[in-house]
Amino acid sequence: MAPELFGRLAAEVPALIGVKVPGGDDSWYARMAAAVGGRLAVFVAGHTLATGRARGAAGAYSNIACLRPEGAVR
């Protein structure tokens, strides 16, 4: 989804407080920041957390645990 659609969703669904997305390049993060204006927490895949946080992501979700949940439990 385009960042602008996330902005529209944030405006129309006040109960929506965060989204899990794959992230993107610098342009994508700039567009997302402009579109959501701090109304949504943006979570990116765990392996992109360092660069995502530097670009404005609020945190990460574990895409690795989704691939192999029993490994995450161990």
Image (cartoon, rainbow, N blue to C red):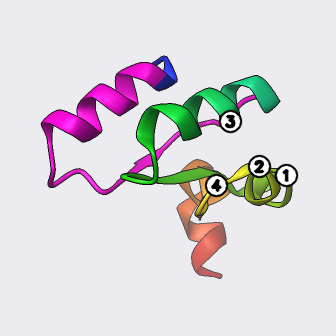
What amino acid is labelled 2 in the image? Arg
Q: Are marks 4 and 2 in contact (CB under 8 Å)?
A: yes
Q: Earlier in the sequence, mark 4 or mark 3?
A: 3
Residue 57's disc is 4
Q: Is residue 2 above or below residue 49?
A: above
Name the residue at 75% across, 51% down.
52
| Residue 9 lies in the magenta-colored region | yes
Residue holding disc 2: 55
Q: Nearer the viewer, mark 3 or mark 1?
A: 3
What amino acid is labelled 3 in the image? Tyr
The quadrant of the image that shows the C terminus is bottom right
- Dot 4 falls on a residue whose secondary structure is loop
Q: Is residue 63 above or below residue 7?
A: below
- Dot 1 falls on a residue whose secondary structure is helix
Name the residue at 53% across, 34% down.
34
Q: Earlier in the sequence, mark 3 or mark 1?
A: 3
Residue holding disc 1: 51
Q: Are marks 2 and 1 in contact (CB under 8 Å)?
A: yes
Depth check: 29 or 68 in front? Answer: 29
Separation of residues labelled 2 and 1 (CA atoms): 6 Å
Residue holding disc 3: 29
Region rendered in magenta: 4-25
Separation of residues labelled 3 and 1 (CA atoms): 11 Å
What amino acid is labelled 1 in the image? Thr
